[in-house]
Image (cartoon, helix red, strand yellow):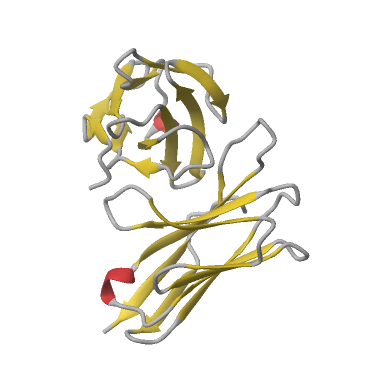
Amino acid sequence: GESVGLHLPTLSVQEGDNSIINCAYSNSASDYFIWYKQESGKGPQFIIDIRSNMDKRQGQRVTVLLNKTVKHLSLQIAATQPGDSAVYFCAEMTLDGNEKLTFGTGTRLTIIP
Amino acid sequence: DSGVTQTPKHLITATGQRVTLRCSPRSGDLSVYWYQQSLDQGLQFLIQYYNGEERAKGNILERFSAQQFPDLHSELNLSSLELGDSALYFCASSARDWQETQYFGPGTRLLVL
């Protein structure tokens, strides 16, 4: 993941529309990727994960896409709801016995009613 | 509610002091992870314990230490505190190891004055 800054990238989406949050990860050897959602005043919450042998995985209203060629990860949220407003983090990890999660900067998603 | 509890919720202390943060994992989870979230460094992995033993280390300073007790709760000790240690400290737990979903606690907000 990219190093963090004080200012998070932001994305505003109309309620009911689909949203796409992007993440550029840094380690080409990463095997495992996770998206987390963090609401204000709370800890991160697991949304969905994907392993490097897959390029797409779907959950309930969420889809994660992985493009290893360009080291890019995206999270698609369908039919956004006000409760989707939060900061979303991608995280990457290698599964080589030296596992540790490296988090991206985060994107603040705001759903406009 | 993730099932992970952390105490205290807030902590205010002075530079040079030492504090202990406590974490109780979800029932049955063997792994505990500690993370630091600050404005300038983002979310960073500090250390992992599995069933009482240190399993993985991240960006943890030498002034910081942790342990996991036989009842699987964990404590993060922060000593010789500096202004820059002000941050949110999260604990997460998983059933066994990295490839399983990590559930985050609500965090302890530390302010060093």
Measured as percent of width and height from the top left, residue B102 is found at 42, 42
Quadrant for the C terminus of chain B in the image: top left
**Residue found at x 36% / y 74%:** A110
Measured as percent of width and height from the top left, residue A46 is found at 41, 53
Vertical comparison of B7 with A45: above or below = above
| B84 to the left or right of A99 | left
**Residue found at x 53% / y 38%:** B98
Vertical comparison of B96 with A13: above or below = above
Q: Quadrant of residue A66?
A: bottom right
Near-viewer residue (B78 or B112): B78
Residue ranking furthest to the top: B70
Residue ranking furthest to the right: A69
Total label count?
A: 0
Measured as percent of width and height from the top left, residue B31 is found at 43, 29
Near-viewer residue (B109 or B7): B7
| A91 to the left or right of B113 | right
Vertical comparison of A3 with B93: above or below = below
Measured as percent of width and height from the top left, residue A79 is found at 37, 83
**Residue found at x 42% / y 25%:** B82
**Residue found at x 41% / y 35%:** B95
